[in-house]
Amino acid sequence: MADQELTWHGALARWDRRLFDAVARRHWPGADRVLPRLGRAANHGVLWGGAAAAIAVFGSAGARKAAVRGVASLALASATINTVGKWSVRRPRPLLEGVPLTRQLATQPQTTSFPSGHSASAFAFTAGLALESPGWGAALAPVAASVAFSRVYTGVHYPSDVLVGAALGVAAGFVVRRLARDAQEARVVPGDERAAAGAPALPEGAGLTVVVNTGSGTAAAAGLELLRARLPKAEVIECAGPELPATLADAASRSAVLGVCGGDGTVNAAATAALRAGVPLAVFPGGTLNHFALDLGLSGTEGTCHALTHGQAVRIGVGRFSPGPGGEPGYFLNNFSIGAYPELLGHRLRWGPRIGGGPAALLAAWRVLRAQRPVRLRLAGRPRSVWLLFAGNGTYHGTGPTPRRRDSLGEGLLDLRLVYGGGRPGTRLLAAAFTGPLSRSPVHVATRLRSLRIGDIPEGTPLAYDGEYAEAPPALVLDELPDALTVYRPR
C-alpha cells in the first residue's frame, strides 16, 4: 500500500514538472509584460479589494452585497491556506531552471508552495461574487484565471498548486454563501405587528393562487418546488414581464388568498392587487434582496407555508401616493422617493439592456453626480429645493437619507427624509449620510408623519417606489394607511 502511494505521488510530481516545464518553454506574446504585473497586483488581495471597492461605489445594491460576499470568501480562503494548507504539506517551491529571467519575480516568495494562495484568493473572491451576481462574476472570471496562471508562468508554483488553490477558493465561496444564509435566517425577527383575526387557514393550499415571477431567477425556482410539495392544492401561475400586474389582479379577484413569489417589485404589484381586491397576501421571498420579507420576519418559503397552514397572519401599514401611475393610487411597502435615486434608477433601466447592469450603474451614477439638478417643489405649502425626498413605510433605523432596516411594519407612520438642494449632489448626499436618523441640519432633515402634500412638481420629474420607476404627476399626496393589508407570517 505504501509502495502504491509513493508511485502515485511520483507520477503526480512528474506530471507537474512536465507541465511546468512546458509552460516555461512556450513563448506567450505580450504575457511577459502583463502576467507578472497582474500577479504582483494581487499580492495581499489588493487587486480584489480594489475591485470590491469599485463595485461598492458604482454597482447596484445587489452588486454591493455580492462584493461583500466576495471579500468574505477571500478572507476565509486566505486564512485557511496560510494556516492549515501551507503548514500541512510544506512543498518546496519549483526550481526556476528553464523559466526566462524576464518572467521571474524580483522577490521570490518565502512560504511553501502548496497550495497557491494567489489562486485561492482569486477564485474565492470571484466565486463569492458570482454566487450573488453572475454578471460581475463572469466579468472578473478571466482576471482570476489570469492571476492563477501567472503563478505557473512566473515559476513560483506548480500547476497542481494552482488547481488545488482554485478549488479551495471556490469551496470558500460556497461556504460563505451557506453561512450568510444561516445568519440571515437567524436575524429574521418578527416585529410587533398586530395579529390579523380571521385569516383563513389553508392546510393544503385550497383557495390559494400563487403568481410566480419567473424573471426573479433561481431563488424563485427553489421556492416554487417547496411550495408545490407543502401546498399541493394551491394554484400556481408562472409569468413575467408586462403581463404580471394583470395576472395578479385576476388571481386576486377569484382567490381566498393571493400568493406571490418574487422580489420586492413583484411583491409591491401583488400587494396592490390584494388591497384592491380586499384579500390577504402570502409572500414567498424569491428576489435578490427581499427587504420587505426580511423586515416582516419571513425567512423563506417554509415559514409562509407554515403560516398558511395554521392561519397565522398580521396586519401591516402601507404607504400610498395619490395619484399614482394611470391615475389610480399607488402603494409602497418599503419606500418612495423623488430626486437623485429615481434619476439614477431611470438611467440604469434605460442603459442596462444595452450595456449590462454593472456598466449601466456606473454610467448612471456618473450622469447623476455630474448633471443632476435639485428638484424644486412645494412641500406642505412651502417651496423647497431637494436633492432627495425619501419616505419609508414605517420607521427605518440607521443614519443617512436612505437607511435599510425596520423593526415593525405596523407603526402606521411615514419616515420622511430630505436632502436639501445646494452645492453638488455627491457632497450633499455624503454629508447627509453622516447625520443622525432624526436630525435637522442645513443638509438633511428627518421626521415622522402621517401624510404630506407635494405640489409644483416639475414636468418630467421621475419617482421611484419599491424599486419601480414612473413619472411624477404635477402634485400628489403621500400618506400612510395603518393596518391596511393582511399578510401571512408565522408566530
Image (spheres, helix red, strand yellow):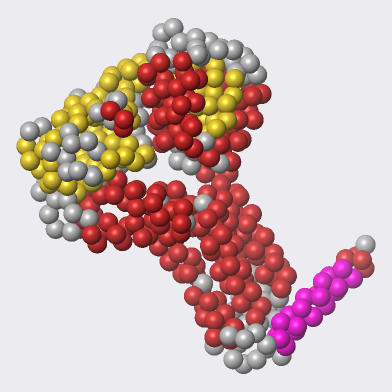
190 relative to 441, above or below: above
The quadrant of the image that shows the N terminus is: bottom right
**Is residue 59 visible to the viewer in this orientation of the structure?**
no
Report the span colored magenta. Answer: 6-26
In the image: residue 132, left or right of residue 442:
right
Residue projecting furthest to the bottom: 101
Residue closer to the observer: 182 or 218:
218
Residue projecting furthest to the left: 382
Residue 362 x/y as whole percent: 37, 60
**Is residue 175 visible to the viewer in this orientation of the structure?**
yes
Name the residue at 29% across, 45% down. 342
436 relative to 207, above or below: below
Q: Quadrant of residue 274?
A: top left
Residue 354 x/y as whole percent: 46, 57
Q: Quadrant of residue 228?
A: top right
Name the residue at 87% across, 68% down. 8
Residue 295 x/y as whole percent: 39, 31
Whether the magenta-drawn stretch holds residue 50 is answered as no
Q: Quadrant of residue 167?
A: bottom right
Name the residue at 46% across, 15% down. 253
Residue closer to the observer: 294 or 267:
267
Name the residue at 55% across, 53% down. 134
In the image: residue 11, left or right of residue 116:
right
20 relative to 254, above or below: below
**Would you say the magenta stretch is mainly helix, strand or loop?**
helix
Residue closer to the observer: 282 or 444:
282
Residue 54 x/y as whole percent: 40, 62
